[in-house]
Image: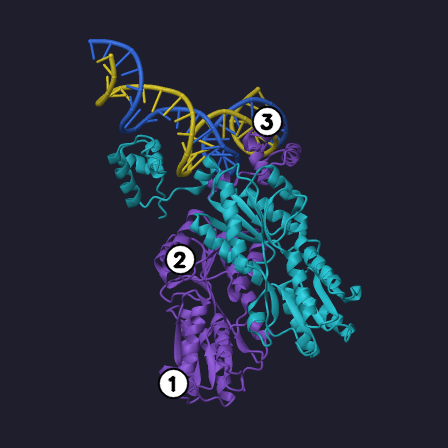
Chain colours: A purple, B cyan, C yellow, D blue
Amino acid sequence: MAKKVSIKDIASAAGVSATTVSIVLNGRAREMKISEAMAKKVEKLAEKLNYRPNLFAKGLRTGKTHTIGLIVDDISNYFFGHLAKVVEEEADKKGYTVMFCSSENNEGKSRNILNMLVDKHMDGYIIAPTTFMLPELEKLIAEKRPTVLIDRYFPSLNSNFVTVDNFTGSLEAINHLASKAVKKIALVTNDTDQLQMQQRIDGYVSGLKKNKLPLDPSLVKKIPFGRPEAKQVKDLVQFFSRMKGKFDAVFFTSNNLGVAGLEAFNLLGLTVPDQVSVLCFDDNDLFRLGKPGITVMSQPIKQMAKKAVEVLVKQIEQADSPLSHVVLHTQLIERASVQ
Amino acid sequence: MAKKVSIKDIASAAGVSATTVSIVLNGRAREMKISEAMAKKVEKLAEKLNYRPNLFAKGLRTGKTHTIGLIVDDISNYFFGHLAKVVEEEADKKGYTVMFCSSENNEGKSRNILNMLVDKHMDGYIIAPTTFMLPELEKLIAEKRPTVLIDRYFPSLNSNFVTVDNFTGSLEAINHLASKAVKKIALVTNDTDQLQMQQRIDGYVSGLKKNKLPLDPSLVKKIPFGRPEAKQVKDLVQFFSRMKGKFDAVFFTSNNLGVAGLEAFNLLGLTVPDQVSVLCFDDNDLFRLGKPGITVMSQPIKQMAKKAVEVLVKQIEQADSPLSHVVLHTQLIERASVQ
DNA sequence: ACAGGTTACTAAATCGTTTTAGTAAAACGT
DNA sequence: ACGTTTTACTAAAACGATTTAGTAACCTGT
């Protein structure tokens, strides 16, 4: 039934050796002085027999897969889903396929995933790293496997990365809020030591200082990075009702926190922007089209993904290419949630 | 640097043959009468040398990869992103990893992707098929490769599938609209012959009939399945303004059409639900949390994904398991967009 | 006419597993 | 005490490609 055509079948059909067939099918006929006629004949036969190379055999011999591994926190998240999509498109253009995995920000899964991808011999890796991955990443880099970190990186790790200027983005977000005469800005962020979040928090702190606004630690809420969104909403409902009247704006450091926050406002009957102004790091359909539109500090997702693939492929295809540190800029999109 | 430990290294370190090592590491020691002591020794050594099997060699020999391929229209879409996430989780539980691909609903990509996955020897496939894929799918099924179609299927193709009762869901959506005294219901759908869309359209038509509402073909808008969302919005703006006053409700057959529709309403200054009622097939953050909340006919995404993996894995692990046709039910979630 | 080069190929090794077909040595039954 | 099983392993083939190291046959210049 499933008749598998191998290189030997072509070879015997053409009356030549497997070597010749391999050379021809890898496009090295000219180079290897295979006659034009023979090359044509072999190609025709391969076509006719519907030959498909066995990628295991190929991989075993060459170690190459033309596949890149992409690790993100959560593929169903707006930011990562869109990132993944563009990564796939760009990789496809350059002849690579991509294998996605979600780390779920969980220690066990983070480490397993990376090992699993290495076992599958990806040609390169694009990773939104969790802090748990640091040891594995160090190994990866030490073994000189092409790797690009995305969204965040480790200052201690000498790797390629593509990120956004989180500090400045956050600072400008606070400047914007301050310019609208908002006085008491709460911060909702994740309880994680990932760099991008730290930088966004630092931006918030600096922003307050620069605008001579007081920093009130009780207005900073760190939500555990866990999964269930319902739990996040509950935490926020509690937080916002406890702090009622003590804040007139909230800055969310990620798009999923922003979504949970809006849900909490709904439940509490708090209206945006009348009772509370909102600004969120990272954009989303809900922010763009919901009423009121949510003012956001948006990330150039497409560019990030493009750059990451570009850097990675360069790294894969020329071993000695130097490290790239790409820092893109965020953009304030004013909508109706700040007044 | 990258010292690769092979089974032979373990064999010579343990003073045994490669065969023995292979048997032990595949957990067949008992069965193959390898002594307890030797098994322990080999396992210890494998651990100590940090042995990682070469998956190419393994795959070349066994033909198995413990990987399943998932093809969706677009990984950045809410429905497919969430589906993919659950597929990955469930597959992980059963010891499989998953390789995602987006077909982009495009002919060339659709066919390439499937061939590529077959070349990579997936153990099984979960596919939201495009009509372009039919010939490849027929081949897949004929070759008895474990396959589960999801979201839609081909009546002519004798395959497993997991879907939703699109006809009834759509019918009930129209019933709901009609029950609110809405009279002129426009339909916005995709210009595709995919089955799920046809069924939703049929549900709309039957719903109108059942409620003795006239079917006005000029109120049915089919948007080409193409990519650029901006273009979809433009089409809809045009359609809605041309038909102004001729409809008092719109039923969207997919969540991304709904998003584009809301954007169009924004641009036209049409208010929901005062000037137009809205009901959308499939849910979304925007519909759930936006103001007004959009009434939707929601799909049980989690269940669909779970079922698909369950059926697929059964199919993979026991070749003769019978075909499964799973049809789940949609659920009306009433919010504020219908009045 | 013959060394030396080029052309057009091929045989065999190799990648790292799994599996088939054994085989000595020990244990067992009568 | 001798044939048969069982135990505890092993050598070699196989999976399907790529690559190394050739080798005849033909050309070319002197």
Q: Quadrant of the C terminus of chain A?
A: bottom right
Rounded to the nearest angstrom, the CA distance separating label 3 from label 2 is 48 Å
Same subunit: marks 2 and 1: yes
Question: Which subunit holds the residue at mark 1?
Answer: A
Residue in the image at 48% along x and 42% along y: A59
For label 3, the SS is helix
| Marks 1 and 3, the one that precedes in the sequence | 3
For disc 2, the neighbor class at 10 Å (few under 14, some 14 to 19, many from 20) is: many
Q: Horizontally, is C26 left or right of B157 in the view? A: left
**A113, B8: nearer the viewer:** A113
- Residue identifier under label 1: A215
Residue B264 at x, y percent in the picture: 68, 73
Q: Quadrant of the N terminus of chain A?
A: top right
Q: Is residue A71 placed above or below A50 in the rendered structure? A: below
- Residue identifier under label 2: A110
For label 2, the SS is helix
Mark 1 is on which residue type?
A: Leu
Q: Is residue A269 placed above or below A88 in the rendered structure? A: below
Q: Horizontally, is A194 left or right of A22 in the view? A: left
**Rendered image: mark on residue A12:** 3
Residue B332 at x, y percent in the picture: 60, 65
Mark 3 is on which residue type?
A: Ser
Mark 2 is on which residue type?
A: Ser
Which numbered disc, 1 or 3, marks the residue closer to the eye? Answer: 1
Residue in the image at 31% along x and 38% along y: B10
